[in-house]
Amino acid sequence: MLIDFGHKFAHYLDAYIQNHHIEEDELDDITPDLYLEWLDMPQDWLNGVSPNAYFREMDPVTLVKTLGQYMLSDITLPGPLLNRIADLREDTYPLLISLLKNYSGENEDKIRTIVVKLIEEMDMEHPYLYYIDMIAQTCEKNEFSEACVDELRNAGPEYLETVMNAFEQAQNAYAMDCFLDILTDLPYDERTYNYVIERFLLSDSQKAFYAQCLGKIGNPQALPSLEEALRQEDIRYFDYMAIRNALEELGGEADIERDFTGDKDYDSLIDLENKT
């Protein structure tokens, strides 16, 4: 049976507050230290061992297996479990990679996403080629593909050609946009600019996304196209803001003010601001 360590600590914290007459404004300052102390306190519900010691008794295989069980549950991942997996990174890393690549079933995207983030927190090498393959096979946005994109942004210049090839061979629009997004965070390449400006000029639904990409690429040759787009009478509010931001990032001046009253996104934003 899995133990909800977060619930156990919350119960301890409530009792501590009552016993020591802690005011609410003091809570944020003392909670982190209390939690660290609690992790090393022997607990009756753990047969006299502390939460940290409980996980220290597990071997690497059991740790990763337990991680999987928690990820399939609705219980928050225990901090001491994650810490122990990180402490034994040389032994747990291959097991995590195996879990990442081989698991299929319930909560598949959630589990893979957690493993990707854990690899990052452990400061271990990401399987970037695997991430690229997974993005290429994905037709719609999900949390795992987005996690892969986030990590590939930091893959380094040695992956530029691999990502470029993946973009050029991609079979669906979502994967193509993911790879373009990654390329805009890698060292400048004229091909990236050409691909993005072409899509910016031809796209309607993704205008804001491609404008953001142009802003990141940093090529001022995009300024005339951005300025022209900003003057379009039927421009949508979110597109206008993204294009304006890109224009200013590239050193241009957005001197075209518009009234977006009646635009559903603009009106929703104003309503939200008025309520706060």
Image (cartoon, helix red, strand yellow):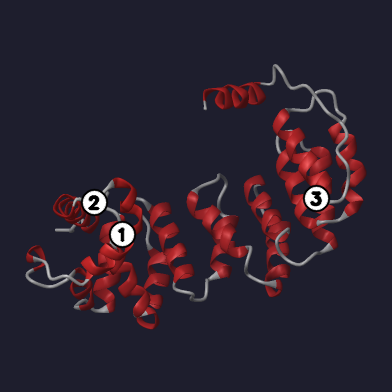
Considering depth in this image, is 4 or 8 the residue closer to the camera?
8
Tell me which residue sits at (18%, 58%) in the image: 3
In the image, residue 229 sits, relative to residue 76, either above or below, namely above
Question: Of the residues tagged 2 and 3, which is closer to the observer?
Answer: 2
Residue at numbered disc 2: 22
Which badge, 2 or 3, comes first in the chain's sequence? 2
Task: Count neighbours of disc 2 (C-alpha within 10 A) and say few if under 14, some if 14 to 19, many if 20 or more.
Answer: few
Which badge, 2 or 1, comes first in the chain's sequence? 2
* Residue 118 image position (x, y, % from top left): 42, 66
User: What is the C-alpha distance between the residues marked 1 and 3?
Assistant: 42 Å
Residue 9 picture quarter:
bottom left
Query: Which element is circle 3 on?
Result: helix
Which badge, 1 or 3, comes first in the chain's sequence? 1
* Residue 39 image position (x, y, % from top left): 23, 68
Tell me which residue sits at (31%, 59%) in the image: 30
Q: Are marks 2 and 3 in contact (CB under 8 Å)?
A: no
Task: Count neighbours of disc 3 (C-alpha within 10 A) and say few if under 14, some if 14 to 19, many if 20 or more.
Answer: some
Residue at numbered disc 1: 30
Q: Is residue 142 left or right of residue 207?
A: left
Residue 90 picture quarter:
bottom left
Q: Are marks 2 and 1 in contact (CB under 8 Å)?
A: yes
* Residue 130 image position (x, y, % from top left): 54, 67
Considering depth in this image, is 164 or 69 the residue closer to the camera?
69
User: What is the C-alpha distance between the residues marked 2 and 3?
Assistant: 49 Å
Query: Which element is circle 2 on?
Result: loop
Residue at numbered disc 3: 249
